[in-house]
Image: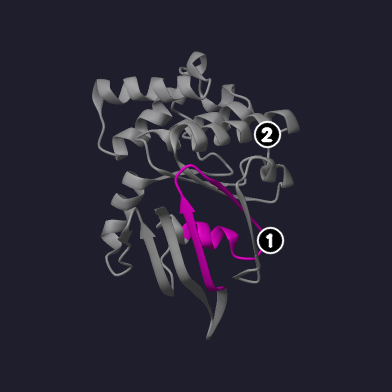
Amino acid sequence: MYVLEAHDITKEFADGSETVPVLRGVSLSLRRGEIVSLEGPSGSGKTTLLSIVGCILTATSGRVIIDGKTVNPDRARDLPKIRRKSIGFVFQQHNLIPALTAAENVEYALNLRGMRGASARIEAKRVLDHVGLGPKADAHPRDLSGGQRQRVAIARALAGNAPILLVDEPTASLDSQTGEQILELFRKLAKGENRAVLVVTHDPKVRAVADRLVTIRDGQLVN
């Protein structure tokens, strides 16, 4: 059974009096336990597709199904709830809150998912330990390396046990060795925890850990 499905997705943006097509009938599905690498040149529609299946943007047409339930684009108020329950995001720029420690950044994500107090603090420590950052729980982002900040972002995405991880250019700002460690961590999360991982990337090294490679050009999948 697929945990994430996108069927015939189109997306158009307004540009003055014209509409610009970005996605042209894209279909993509993910199962638990697999990593899919989504590759393509800049402007091909990768990030737009990631935002649509992640319930940040709504499609112009087509359907998104998460955990067997169709996302209703006309009920925008339901989208944050779907994201909190089913989707963890790992952004290229980490998007950590500078004033909060690593643990507090993860705890804040748990607060948004409805977990608070001691339970949230315990869970934040658990997921930081899980990604190898337990000793850095009290450090602020400015005191962490790029790879460590990326691990905090991954811990934040894992908090709450979302079955789907959507990852945007996870190795773009990392050195080769750290990038390989991060990719190995994604592989363990998919295989060891039965999560579905979709990675948007320009990095060919992602192919080494991916189960499938999907290429998008000019808003269409080409394989």
**Residue 14 percent across, percent down from the top left:** 51, 78
Q: Amino acid at mark 2?
A: Gly
**Residue 210 percent across, percent down from the top left:** 62, 45
At 48% from the left edge and 31% from the top edge, which residue is drawn? Answer: 192
From the viewer's perspective, is 6 left or right of 120? Answer: right
Residue closest to the eye, 9 or 174: 9
Q: Amino acid at mark 1?
A: Ser
Q: How many marks?
A: 2
- Measure how far apart labels 1 and 2 are at the Cα level: 21 Å
Give the crowd class for mark 1: few <14, some 14-19, many >=20 residues within 10 Å: few
Q: For the residues carrying marks 1 and 2, which lies nearer the camera in this image?
A: 2
Q: Residue 204's mark? A: none
User: Could you tell me if residue 101 is visible in this image?
Assistant: no
Give the crowd class for mark 2: few <14, some 14-19, many >=20 residues within 10 Å: many
* Residue at the outermost top position: 135
**Residue 201 in magenta stretch:** no
**Residue 77 percent across, percent down from the top left:** 27, 59
Secondary-structure class at tag 2? helix
Quarter of the figure that contains the C terminus:
bottom right
User: Could you tell me if residue 105 is visible in this image?
Assistant: yes
What residue does disc 2 label? 179
Secondary-structure class at tag 1? loop
Position of residue 173 relative to residue 152, above or below, is below
Quarter of the view holding residue 63: bottom left
What residue does disc 1 label? 42
Residue closest to the eye, 186 or 133: 186
Find the magenta span and give its range. Answer: 23-51
Q: Indicate how the structure is coloured in the image.
A: one colour
Comes first in the chain, label 1 or label 2 = 1
Position of residue 153 relative to residue 17, above or below, is above
At 40% from the left edge and 21% from the top edge, which residue is drawn? Answer: 126
